[in-house]
Image: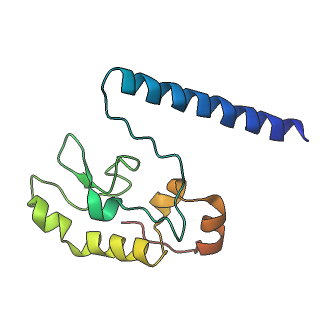
Amino acid sequence: MTVRKRIEELEVEHLQILMNDLEEYAKAVGMNLSIQHELYDEQNQCPWPWLGTFIDVTGNVIPCCRVANADICSFGNLKEQSFDEIWKSDGYNHLREQIRTNDIPVFCDSCYKADFIKTHGKEERFQN
């Protein structure tokens, strides 16, 4: 085993211990905490485009808290459009179609398994 591989294993072990500690603490204080342990792939697709969104302090509607940056992706602003208009917009529906067909946008890469990205990557992918 290489030193690099062992360091990676230790980092994963340390992260798992930290996540377990956080979950135990949240339970002890009565907090609802959900930590995503698995990355997405063809069988386990991201549900956020259908379930929820992230709205920043200036009113930008962003696909999720992991993107959380309107400069990366924003489907509209609540100061200019209603939430219903943004939620049902062509842009949001395009994102849903991309996720449904495993043609994920670049800004979703960090939530998907590396081998999925390699096999589904394209030179030109949707960049809001």
**Residue 110: percent from left, percent from top:** 53, 53
In this rendering, would 8 be left or right of 82? right
**Residue 113: percent from left, percent from top:** 60, 59
**Residue 124: percent from left, percent from top:** 52, 74
Q: Up-down: is 73 above or below 123?
A: above
**Residue 39: percent from left, percent from top:** 54, 55
Q: Nearer the viewer, residue 10 or 67?
A: 10
At 12% across and 67% down in the image, what residue appears? 85
Q: Quadrant of residue 77?
A: bottom left
In this rendering, would 122 be left or right of 1? left
At 75% across and 38% down in the image, what residue appears? 9
- Indicate the quadrant containing the C terminus: top left, top right, bottom left or bottom right: bottom left
Of all residues, the one furthest to the right in this rendering is 1
Q: Nearer the viewer, residue 64 or 51?
A: 51
At 42% across and 62% down in the image, what residue appears? 46
Q: Nearer the viewer, residue 98 or 34?
A: 34
At 52% across and 46% down in the image, what residue appears? 37
Q: Nearer the viewer, residue 27 or 3?
A: 27
Q: Quadrant of residue 92?
A: bottom left
Q: Up-down: is 2 above or below 85?
A: above
Q: Up-down: is 39 above or below 96?
A: above
Q: Up-down: is 37 above or below 88?
A: above
Q: Quadrant of residue 90?
A: bottom left
